[in-house]
Amino acid sequence: MSLPPAAPIRASEALRKKLAKIGLHSEADLLTHLPLRYEDETRITPVAQACSGEPVQVEVVVHHNEVQFQPRKQMLVHASDGSGEIILRFFSFYPSQQALLAAGARLRAFGEVRHGFFGAEMVHPRFRKLLGDEPLPTEMTPVYPSTAGLANSALQKLIARAMADADLAETLPEALRKELRLPGLARSLRFLHTPPPGTELAALHSRNHPAWRRVKFDEVLAQQLSLRRAYLARREQGAPVLVARDDLGARLLDALPFGLTGAQLRAIAEIAGDLAQPYPMQRLLQGDVGAGKTIVAALAACQAISAGWQAAFMAPTEILAEQHYLKLQDWLAPMGIRVAWLSGSLKSKAKREQLAATAAEAQLVVGTHALIQDGVDFARLGLAIVDEQHRFGVAQRLALRKKGSNPHQLMMSATPIPRTLAMSYYADLDVTVLDELPPGRTPIKTRLVADSRRDDVVAFVKKLVAEGRQAYWVCPLIEESEALQLQTAESTYEQLQEDLPGLRVGLVHGRLKAAEKQAVMVAFAAGEIDVLVATTVIEVGVDVPNASLMVIEHAERFGLSQLHQLRGRVGRGQYESSCVLIYAGPLGQVARQRLKIIFENTDGFEIARQDLHLRGPGEFVGSRQSGVPLLRYADLELDADLIDMAREVAETLLTTQPELAEKHLQRWLGSREELLKS
């Protein structure tokens, strides 16, 4: 069933453009555009009773006003109400306002009262000149999210009209609503837009009121319905049935010099089951740094190849893609599998050869974004593997899928995703978690060091290299930036050459040519470089077991996910490993929290949970957000129970009452649901 499109907002073209900036396009959008806070203009507070720091409304008569120019230009309006005097202070004003606030004017002013040396004052209050006896409002004043040039009063009028005209019929069956103990939608929305006098504002502002709970549930339900519907729609599409015809996967397992963890074996079984289905797999494989995702992906590729199809393996950076290529080539070439390599840096002749192989006999094609460029044609693409999937946008992942006949898709991420985020933003995917690390991974000691003790870190590097180990030294920028005053890779490289005489210091960064980068990385892996100075190009995928020290310069400038990824580049061998975080003070509150979290935690899922709490879901989800409407009201941690409830209700509605599901989606998402169809 498909409902007619939502009615556009009845307003002038200029006003509609302003409304569109805050996501308001239809009358239905106005209904769910809820207040940020409320102001109580239903009562007058005598000046003498106004508490400091509390927003109140006073009714006063102006004695006089004056303009001062020191320490800055401002207008002071001196007024009183019989109980006490108050100053209304304006730093930005027009001559017309000064005339309006002349002696004798009677005002109602709303704002936060401050008590200082000169007595009570309000800074930039909202005020209205009274022309006679005017009754007080009977309801709280809602304050809505807005944009420049869009007055709160205009939003109030539009929303009030939309509420009066709206069809607020229930989209939850009555029995279900009572079972979930949720109030009615019409009652909840009316209450939130126009709370009656005497309403406890604390419950409204903290969003714990039952009316808020109903709205948050409906919002989460809309997201779950949309993602679940996209999931079911994909299941109706055809896909290659990839059933192995030989023992290629078993031979690869036998040839490996290591055993697999229970988590890896479970993941392989789940993926194998997906690939044998006649509809496309959409699975997210996530695991902490070093959990062994690459071999799981390799075995999935073996199943596709064994079934007579091709597999593609796309990674976001050339260094990571090439590392995957070399590892997969090492595993699969001895078994007669043809592995091709595609990147933007290939010379013309080599590129032509690899393109020809991709279109013909290559069974596995590894590469960067080059895989999705025009002119790249696959013979029979049956499986698309995307590593570090959060670094690719929706359109890029879709472009790879379009290179084949609706191939299965396996997305991988070494950034652990908290459970509530996975349930909410990844409800259209099947999620597999590698929650075990392979045996032999040594614990990593994390140390926080102020940049004033840099010499101690250099001495530690000397000692470590003397014992036969290697070290990374990571910097956030390539060139000098006076504004940020960050230590750069190039200056650090030069300084360390002076500080570490006799040691072999290498440099790698994103602006080096691919061949130069690869040469440095090969030399480091071979033990020909003792200390590798690098930018974050080495964040993912680099595997050098002899490297047991990671030094991160200006650690306060990195995000938690990056710090955790970089730390995971060491501890891959048998040696005790350390990660030294050099920070520059003074630290801001968020930077201090980040460093505290990374210092106290080694579990990627706990770090991700705290990162989500610090940053919010929009930033955490990254590229994915271009394909998923973000939650405006529900909180992933505080409202986790609502997400669980909404998942079950979404299944029920789609199965038993699809017309209600459609109506619910139209009300909450409208045209935004189109974003999900990619």
Image (spheres, helix red, strand yellow):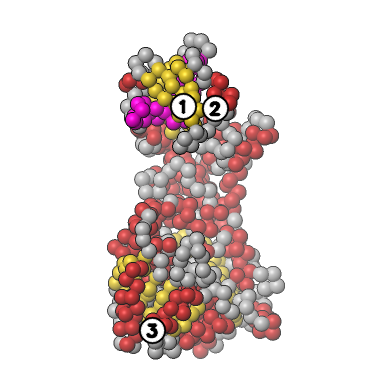
Residue 17 seen in the figure: yes
The amino acid type found where label 3 is placed reads: Leu
Q: Residues within 10 Å of mark 2 (few under 14, many from 20)?
A: few
State the CA–CA distance, disc 3 to disc 1. 65 Å
Q: Is residue 560 above or below residue 139?
A: below
Magenta residues? Answer: 105-130
Can you tell which quarter of the image residue 261 is in? Answer: bottom left
Q: Is residue 654 above or below residue 138?
A: below
Q: Which residue is mark 3?
A: 500
The amino acid type found where label 2 is placed reads: Ser
Q: Helix, strand or loop at disc 3?
A: loop
Residue 162 seen in the figure: no
Q: Helix, strand or loop at disc 2?
A: helix
State the CA–CA distance, disc 1 to disc 2. 26 Å
Q: Earlier in the sequence, mark 3 or mark 1?
A: 1
Numbered tag placed on residue 357 in the rendering? none
Q: Is residue 46 above or below residue 154?
A: above
Residue 427 in the image, given as x and y percentages of width and height: 47, 54
Instruction: Single out the mark in the foreground, 1 or 2.
Output: 1
Q: Is label 2 in contact with label 3 (beta carbons under 8 Å)? A: no
Q: Nearer the viewer, residue 491 or 466?
A: 491
State the residue at coordinates (41%, 77%): 472
Predominant SS of the magenta segment: strand
